[in-house]
Image (cartoon, helix red, strand yellow):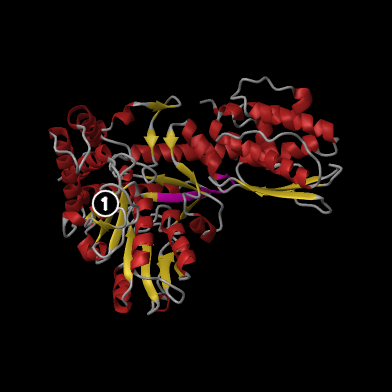
Amino acid sequence: MMLDGLYQDIILDHYKHPHGRGLREPFDGEAHHVNPTCGDEITVRVTADLADISYDGLGCSISQASASVLHELLQGKDRAAVAEIHHAFVELMQSRGQVEPDEDVLGDGIAFAGVAKFPARVKCALLPWMAFKDAAARAGVEVGASPEVKA
Amino acid sequence: MSFDVARVRKDFPIFEREVNGHPLVYLDSANTSQKPVQVLDVMRAHQEKHNGNVSRSVHTLGTESTELYEGARAKVAAFIGAGSTDEIVFTKNSTEAINLVAHAAGQLLKLGPGDEVVISEMEHHSNLVPWQLLCERTGATLRWFGITDEGRLDESALNALVNERTKLVSVVHMSNVLGTINDVSALVARARQVGALVMLDCSQSVPHFPVDVRELGVDFIAFTGHKMLGPTGIGVLWGRYELLATMPPFLAGGSMIETVAMGKTTFAAPPARFEAGTPPITEAIGLGAAVDYLTGLGMENIHRHEQEITRYALEQLSAVPGVRIYGPVKPEGRGGTVSFGVDGVHPHDVGQILDALGVEVRVGHHCARPVCVRFGVPAMTRASFYLYTTTDEIDALARGLDQVRKVFG
């Protein structure tokens, strides 16, 4: 298995230098998600206008880099744009590597295309995105239907 | 008798395969062991030639199956020094064996508020959650031994922890995370003083070194077939017969009865009382074959080989910059399961890179989250060895860790 597909430089950069990390106030919705099989965890906070998305967590390079990319892609966008990007990222992760990601929509998120080929790691990449969705819902913002996450 | 690891490996077909273009380096035997052809052949032959249901058929196949199934029970009994074959109860796994005791012995002891059950922080969830639930059901209090910084059971408060209120103590014989082998002699002596029952989770000990239940002096042990070269789906509860004989059933149904009337049922004697329904027959016979294989090599020889591998692994891992070993750092008083952290790299990432090199280790909390919490980490990387592990495989692990540091350096 080619590891280069998994550990892209973009992912390692986000892992070593995360964007927007740290929990901030004020916020309107918060969610804490845990991956019970590995103990990874993340807390995401959002404001109702999605102007601020903050997070903190413990976990592997994939889950932590994914949180950093989420912050970069979604912070300050309107609900429709957030829903589109969220949908595209979840679809990419569930594609088993069969979907060609659109860089215009996903930016650095396209680096996760390789992760989709490692079923055991898809959960890691999706952890912050699922926590974000719940946090947004608690802030009164719906960003799309729940995907079925298969381990 | 010398132990020829190269010859042993020839019995395990899986070592012929590659993983991700590299020879398989299997360092996850604490999770599940690989199976020798001797076990696979016996199981296949049973299905092809003798298959019938046990303990109820008059016909030839049923009789042969029953003889093979009961023969496996006798092999397991001899393997652990049981007083009689009737002390061996076949279960699905260790977890079911422990749950059986938590229900049946829990009922026998008539636990209630004021009573105490003692476990340890070192437990696999399977020897933790059943006791939590038992205490919730009965109002008894759950207490536990801590772990020392060296990864040993902290017995400094033994007499306070195991006291006249203690009804049952259940601890792990060998830690599935730290590799620690617990000398339970002081604990057993104290439990006897206060009249408490003692159970040992032997899932990681029975597969790896000689275990004699009479020497241990305990009341129950649990272990599982798939960690000792046998198949999944078969586990063992050993209990002192006089205790088993007084315990109520756990699961109810066919095979565990004496006489059934519409209003009332009486139950069979142990072990049948605790084996409701058609048991995992082929799996039990496979476990019997695994016991034959282990006995043929000699558990002392297997243990000595694993001690040598463990000594080598501890040396090699200590030499890798940024690696921290959790648990005893010397081979004395520990088995061949070594958990560690790589500075600045999450265990999932360590495991992923090692897998790319064909090195199979386990990462995560190893179903023993309190152990990880005790050492202040969310997860660990674990390499675990068995009779087929070689020093070359340890070298492959060390090279893999160099690669981990390169990717995340």
Secondary element at tag 1:
loop
Q: Quadrant of residue B259?
A: bottom left
Give the position of the C terminus of chain B as an image quadrant. Answer: top right
Task: Judge left or right: residue B353 versus residue B35.
Answer: right
* Residue drawn at x 14%, y 37% as measured from the top left: B64
Which residue is at a point 37% across and 58% down the rendered structure image? B180
Q: What range of the chain is rendered magenta?
A: B338-346
The amino acid type found where label 1 is placed reads Met
In this rendering, the answer to whether B294 lies above or below B218 is above
Query: Residue A120 lies in magenta, yes or no?
Result: no
Can you give x and y, in whole percent of width and height, for residue A127 in the image? 65, 41
- Nearer to the camera, A79 or B247: B247
Q: Residues within 10 Å of mark 1 (few under 14, many from 20)?
A: many
Residue B147 seen by the camera: no
Q: Is residue A131 above or below residue B267?
A: above
In this view, the residue farthest toward the front is B262
Q: How many marks?
A: 1
Q: Position of residue A81 (x, y in %)?
A: 82, 31
Residue B340 lies within the magenta run: yes
Where residue B308 sits: x, y (%)? 29, 49
The residue indicated by pointer 1 is B256
